[in-house]
């Protein structure tokens, strides 16, 4: 089984998850005005406890982003006996999880705050990139590498392949959500869009694409 090339983050306890839920609620309500005092008051715990668990405000935001990003899951693949159906299933699973997460009000609020602070080179923007987008890339790349090892995918660079897949999944969905458009995000729509993205990616990077191109070329 292949593991992502990133440190394992301990899962929050039930009480800590309740605090992270409060953080997301306050981000929706107050945006970047979030304070440790407000979190402690809403979560009915002391600021001392928050500092003990998360370190500081940036640590609390980091834990919140990590918890959100952890919902975009993909089961590891064994290299031996891997077939196209299993690879496609993993890609669809990842895409559906990601679309579900970014469609939530809390994720939209978190990303709006991060974007709003980007001009000031805020800590939150860096946190969202490192523990959101970049972490999700590290999570999927072992699946892409297993697909290449099994002869099911053809690519030179895993990051380029991941960015292509990410673009096929995201399309213009996230920017439209961030701008306030209410898009259909029911499970059936998400599953259909995820299956379409996986199919398009396999068309672009599957071995049949290499066979159809000029000798010695790769997509």
Image (tube, rainbow, N blue to C red):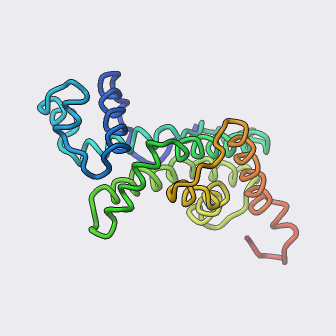
Camera-nearest residue between 44 and 16: 44
Camera-nearest residue between 17 and 40: 40
Q: Quarter of the image containing the N terminus? A: top right
Q: Quarter of the image containing the C terminus? A: bottom right
Q: Is 106 situated left or right of 59 in this image?
A: right
* Image location (x, y in percent) of residue 112: 41, 56
Please tell me whether residue 210 is drawn above or below residue 140 in the rendered image.
below
* Image location (x, y in percent) of residue 167: 62, 61
Q: What is the residue that sits farthest to the left in this orientation? A: 48
Q: In the figure, residue 84 lies in which quadrant?
A: top right
Q: At 34% across and 65% down in the image, what residue appears?
A: 118
* Image location (x, y in percent) of residue 35: 20, 44
Q: At 77% across and 57% down in the image, what residue appears?
A: 200
Please tell me whether residue 163 is drawn above or below residue 132 in the rendered image.
below
Camera-nearest residue between 184 and 133: 184
Q: Is 12 situated left or right of 101 in this image?
A: left
């Amino acid at each position: 089984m292949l593991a992502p090339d990133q440190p394992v983050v301990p899962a929050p306890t039930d009480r800590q998850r309740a605090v992270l839920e409060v953080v997301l609620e306050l981000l929706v309500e107050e945006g970047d005005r979030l304070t440790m005092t407000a979190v402690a008051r809403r979560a009915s715990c002391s600021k001392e406890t928050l500092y003990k668990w998360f370190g500081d405000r940036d640590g609390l935001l980091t834990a919140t982003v990590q918890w959100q990003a952890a919902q975009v899951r993909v089961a590891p693949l064994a290299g031996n006996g891997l077939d196209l159906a299993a690879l496609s299933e993993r890609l669809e699973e990842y895409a559906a999880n990601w679309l579900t997460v970014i469609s939530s009000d809390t994720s939209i609020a978190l990303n709006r705050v991060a974007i709003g602070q980007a001009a000031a080179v805020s800590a939150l923007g860096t946190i969202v990139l490192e523990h959101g987008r970049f972490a999700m890339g590290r999570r999927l790349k072992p699946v892409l590498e297993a697909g290449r090892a099994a002869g099911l995918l053809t690519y030179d660079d895993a990051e380029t392949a991941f960015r292509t897949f990410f673009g096929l999944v995201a399309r213009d969905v996230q920017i439209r959500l961030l701008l306030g458009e209410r898009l259909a995000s029911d499970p059936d729509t998400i599953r259909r869009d995820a299956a379409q993205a996986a199919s398009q990616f396999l068309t672009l990077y599957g071995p049949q694409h290499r066979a159809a191109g000029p000798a010695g070329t790769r997509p």
